[in-house]
């Protein structure tokens, strides 16, 4: 079971004790996939209170969303990627399980972003590299930097539940 945190900073403020209680309850219900962002600090506060539970949480966190005078923008240039990683590590973790950009910034080639992410993985700061809101052509370009494979439903056995994930529906 997973839980994302959209809008947690975009609505009326909720006191930290209530937000921490929500995370306690989610954990008690077995929610162990937490999808966050480098701008959400409440998860870091929860992990600081429960360091023994970090091993149970698979933490996915995004980067690159920045506030601009005209609203939210996205940044993914190679100079920014390591800075963004340090901001993500402020959640109080030594390593991020899955790290990926909110979306591409429109000016930085995906190959440059992924190359910087690979360096961070080699340094042990992230375990897995991801991408969000990209086309299949962009995935293929990223794969050229990463190696590995893009999997489809035929990569899984007949009874493997992953065959039936919505992303594989036609």
Image (spheres, helix red, strand yellow):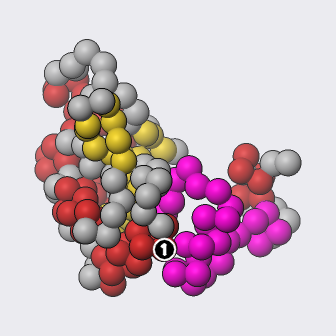
- Looking at the rendering, the stretch of residues picked out in magenta corresponds to 130-156
Q: For the point 36% across and 28% down, which residue is it?
A: 7
Q: Position of residue 167 (x, y in %)?
A: 71, 50
- Under circle 1, the secondary element is helix
Residue ranking furthest to the top: 12
Query: Residue 139's x, y, as percent?
Result: 61, 66
- Residue position for label 1: 111
**Residue 49 x %, y %:** 14, 46
Residue 141 belongs to magenta span: yes
Along the line of sight, the residue nearer the viewer: 26 or 11: 11
Residue at x 25%, y 38% (from the top left corner): 67
The relative height of residue 48 versus residue 128 in the rendered view (above or below) is above
Judging depth in this view, the residue of 67 and 98 nearest the camera is 67
Q: Return the residue nearer the eye: 108 or 38.
A: 108
Residue 34 appears anywhere in the view: no
x 33%, y 53%: residue: 75
Residue 102 seen in render: yes
């Amino acid at each position: 079971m997973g839980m994302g945190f959209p809008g947690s900073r975009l609505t009326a403020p909720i006191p930290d004790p209530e937000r921490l209680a929500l995370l306690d309850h989610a954990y008690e219900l077995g929610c162990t996939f937490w999808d966050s962002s480098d701008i959400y600090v409440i998860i870091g506060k929860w992990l600081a209170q429960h360091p023994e539970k970090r091993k149970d949480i698979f933490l996915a966190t995004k980067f690159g969303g920045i506030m601009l005078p005209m609203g939210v923008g996205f940044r993914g240039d190679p100079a920014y990627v390591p800075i963004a990683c340090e901001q993500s590590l402020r959640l109080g973790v030594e390593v991020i399980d899955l790290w990926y950009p909110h979306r591409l910034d429109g000016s930085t080639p995906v190959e440059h972003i992924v190359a910087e992410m690979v360096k961070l993985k080699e340094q042990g700061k992230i375990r897995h590299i991801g991408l969000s809101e990209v086309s299949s052509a962009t995935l293929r370009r990223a794969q050229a930097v990463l190696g590995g494979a893009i999997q489809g439903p035929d990569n899984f056995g007949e009874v493997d539940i992953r065959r039936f994930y919505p992303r594989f529906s036609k």
